[in-house]
Image (cartoon, grey):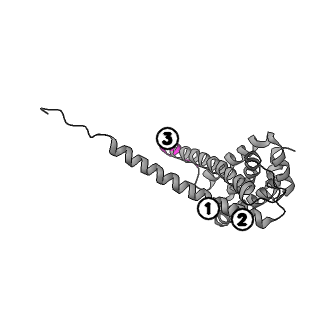
Amino acid sequence: MNYLEKLYRAVILDSELYEEVEADKSLTRQALMTVALVAIIEGIFSFGAPSPTDQGLFVGLSHISQSILGSITRWVMWAFFIAFVGTRILPEPETESNTGELLRTLGFAYAPGVLYVFASLPIIGSIVQLLVPLWQLAAMVVAVRQALDFSSTTRAIGVCVVAFFLMVLTLILFIMFTSFFIAIASNAIPVETPLIGT
């Protein structure tokens, strides 16, 4: 099965595809590729293609680069937090999973984002921008259910919700501590005294 077939099956929420992806370690690169591809498509079609002028092109490419980096960071964080919650806090008796399996399944759960190619079209563009994130959430729930070997979709939703709150709490604490240490460091640096006679 080629990559495009996998993308199609991921978009239509084929649970068997997510099972296959979970088990095949060689598909981690394709999962990463899916995350990056969707970030590029979203960057171009949701926010407009880069302008051909030098400055417009730089700003457009910079925006797309940030979109890719942000998507990959969120993907890795989601996999880590969902693996933690799903295997330590809310597991089922048959739950056996790890971050690698979740990276693969969650990467393919980004696949509905390829529909952002229609986001710049008049009339349907706003519908696409509304529906695609909901479709991706549905794909994420299927991916989590399959990766964690859950029999219950409700439990998969619960894991996603708890992981989301833990991730937000961690980010808030990180920002608070970073701000605190930056403030301490900036107060510890002595102000330069002016030279005598100037």
Q: Which mark is residue 165?
A: 1
Q: Amino acid at mark 1?
A: Phe
User: Which residue position holds label 2?
Assistant: 158
Whole-number angstrom distance, CA of label 2 to CA of label 3: 47 Å
Q: Which residues are magenta?
A: 49-58
Location of mark 3 (residue): 54
> Can you give x and y, in whole percent of width and height, for residue 130 in the image?
66, 66
Q: Is residue 64 magenta?
A: no
The spot of residue 28 in percent (x, y) is: 76, 42
Quadrant for the C terminus, please. top left
Of pointers 2 and 3, the one earlier in the residue sequence: 3
Q: Quarter of the image holding residue 65?
A: top right
Q: Residue furthest left?
A: 197
Question: Residue 98: x, y in percent?
Answer: 75, 48
Pinpoint residue 9: horizontal percent, then vertical percent. 83, 54
**Mark 1 secondary-structure assignment:** helix
The answer to whether 62 is drawn above or below residue 48 in the figure is above
